[in-house]
Image: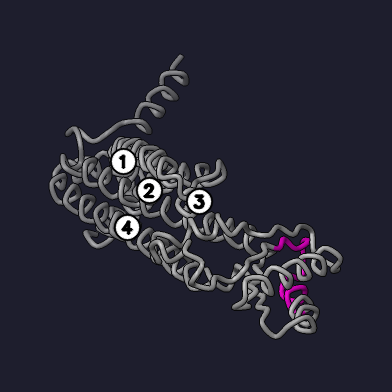
Amino acid sequence: MSGTRDRRAAAAARHRLLPEGRVAGPMPWIIAIMMFLTVLAAAAGLGLGAAVRSMSADLAGRATVQIVEAGAEARDRLSARVAQALRGADGVARVEAVEPATLSDQLRPWLGEDATSGDLPIPALIDVTLTAGQADAKVNRLRRLLSGLSPKIRVEPHAAFLLPLAGLLSALGWLAAGIVLLMALATGAVVVLAARGAHDSHRGTIEVLHLMGATDVQIARLFQRRIALDAMLGSSLGFAVAACVILLLGARLIATGSELLGAVHLPWSSWVMLLTLPVGGILLAMLAARWTVLRALGRAL
């Protein structure tokens, strides 16, 4: 019976908390704000990364052939020859000529009614979808093939147009990763300050515990556990609010109908990574509190 009571007492001591409620009243709210901003920054980085990968996969195998012949009849004849040559070319999966009416409708917001008057020569366009793999080499083969038909044929890969945009999205993704790192450092600094303040305010309690035979590790465990509870509360709240904001913004992006904005999305694997952030925040708070209190106790001796 006495052994059972000793084990229960030891277990109760291991799960004992500090005599006062929270280490620092505002700390859970500060951690919630930090976690909210961290999750938003991480979601932005993951979403932009997914958009860059989606754009690269979608545009790597696509190209547009432009026929810049001024005469309408000559342009139509040359366009038909180009389409026939493309359908028999190696590495071409699909050939689709852009209708002149569709092209005019797309140019009308920029050129006005001149786009449909017929006085303005508009190049004929042919969309080409290449087979998978070695897109650059296949585009170069198409250029060599079509250059023999006419010098007024241009082959433009779609990836070339959006390469600067992909670079911008990649840079923004790295910026988001940097913000996540800075927020993690700021969270650790907040925990260190809170642990130092708690240590200073509990000096009398610490001295009594030392007189009762408590070790530094046991005392540090009390601070670590209380700060872990505050970090759990703040991290859960910050993540929940951030998740709601992300879902709301995702619905708004889809509602725009833009393919580019619609590509900024979070797959399930990204959500799994986001879920690790509050867990990592709690572990970071525990380690920072333990290190801070043990260091303060060691200096006191």
Q: Secondary structure at mark 3?
A: helix
Q: Which residue is mark 1?
A: 238
Q: Which residue is mark 4?
A: 183
Report if residue 177 is visible in the image: yes
**CB atoms of marks 1 and 3 within 8 Å:** no
Q: Of callouts 1 and 2, which one flags the residue occurring earlier in the amino acid sequence?
A: 2
**CB atoms of marks 4 and 3 within 8 Å:** no
x and y, in percent, of residue 95 in the image: 74, 59
Label 1 to label 4: alpha-carbon separation: 13 Å
- For badge 2, the amino acid type reads Val
Label 2 to label 3: alpha-carbon separation: 24 Å
Q: Of callouts 4 and 3, which one flags the residue occurring earlier in the amino acid sequence?
A: 4
Q: Which residue is mark 2?
A: 39
Label 4 to label 3: alpha-carbon separation: 31 Å
Q: Is residue 78 above or below residue 213?
A: below
Which tag is nearer the camera, tag 2 or tag 3?
3
Q: Of callouts 1 and 3, which one flags the residue occurring earlier in the amino acid sequence?
A: 1
Q: Of callouts 2 and 3, which one flags the residue occurring earlier in the amino acid sequence?
A: 2
Q: Assess disc 2: are there few (<14), some (14-19) or many (≥20) residues with their C-alpha within 10 Å of its C-alpha.
A: many
Q: Of callouts 1 and 4, which one flags the residue occurring earlier in the amino acid sequence?
A: 4
Identify the residue at image location x=41%, y=47%.
Answer: 283
- For badge 1, the amino acid type reads Gly
Q: Secondary structure at mark 1?
A: helix
Q: Secondary structure at mark 2?
A: helix
Label 1 to label 2: alpha-carbon separation: 8 Å
Marker disc for residue 259: 3
Which tag is nearer the camera, tag 1 or tag 3?
3
Q: Of callouts 2 and 4, which one flags the residue occurring earlier in the amino acid sequence?
A: 2
**CB atoms of marks 1 and 2 within 8 Å:** yes
